[in-house]
Image: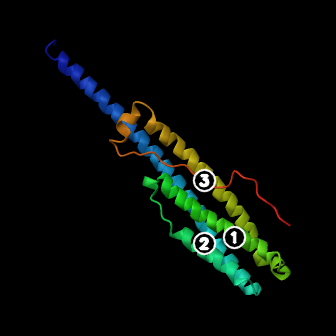
Amino acid sequence: MKRFLPWIIGAVVIFALYSWFKGINNTAVVLNQNVEQSWGDVQTAYQRRNDLIGNLVNTVKGAAEFEKSTLTAVIEARSKATSVKIDPANITPEQLAEFNKAQSGVSSSLSRLLVTVEAYPELKANQNFLKLQDELASTENQILTARTRFNESVKPYNSHIKTFPNSLFAGVFGFKEKAYFNAVEGADRPVEVKF
């Protein structure tokens, strides 16, 4: 029996190490899947907004002789935003900043469109336009919620792979830190209202 004791101890140590590595890896995989699902929710919310923008632009075009430069700016910003592609498995701060900048461009041009609409009373009375405007406001709330949930899913993932001793092995298993959504540049300053 004493002859087998070193083998038994070695087997127990190997099994314990295997279980520990497996736990680190499996937890990181589950947390990574949560991040990817949350990113999918963010993309779905932005896609809904882009679909609504198309309908909104068509409604505005059909209802009024509208300022073409405003409509063109909205269409171009939407096109630019939809061209930014991010792999959820490798979200870097730079990619997320580029995505955020493109989406901010859409928000900005959309705001200009809605302000310009104020000069067209017949458009403000159009039920289809009003419905789209309400849906757009609801979608903006969905985007905010999706972005918040994304950040909430990134936090436990990053915490898991950056805490010791997991940090020693996370890189070996191919897990890298994920980026958070941050406020767009200038969001910390109050909005200037001019009449």
Quadrant of the image containing the C terminus: bottom right
Amino acid residing under circle 1: Leu
Vertical position of residue 83 compared to residue 189: above or below? below
Secondary element under disc 3, as helix, strand or loop, is helix
Left or right relative to 180: residue 16: left
Residue 14 rendering spot, x and y as whole percentages? 26, 28
Q: Nearer the viewer, residue 143 or 188?
A: 188
Circles 1, 2 touching at the beta carbon (< 8 Å) = yes
Residue 96 rendering spot, x and y as whole percentages? 52, 56
Left or right relative to 33: residue 170: left
Q: Which residue is mark 1?
A: 110
- Could you classify mark 3 by the number of other residues whose Cα lies within 10 Å: few (under 14), some (14-19), or many (20 or more)? many
Between the C-alphas of marks 3 and 1, the distance is 19 Å
Q: Is residue 132 visible?
A: no
Q: Which residue is mark 3?
A: 147
Amino acid residing under circle 3: Arg
Residue 90 rendering spot, x and y as whole percentages? 43, 53
Between the C-alphas of marks 1 and 2, the distance is 9 Å
Q: Quadrant of residue 126?
A: bottom right
Amino acid residing under circle 2: Ala
Between the C-alphas of marks 2 and 3, the distance is 20 Å
Q: Residue at left 73%, top 81%? A: 60
Vertical position of residue 92 compared to residue 119: above or below? above
Q: Residue at left 76%, top 85%? A: 63
Q: Residue at left 52%, top 40%? A: 156
Q: Which residue is mark 2?
A: 77
Q: How many marks?
A: 3
The first of marks 2 and 3 along the sequence is 2
Quadrant of the image containing the N terminus: top left
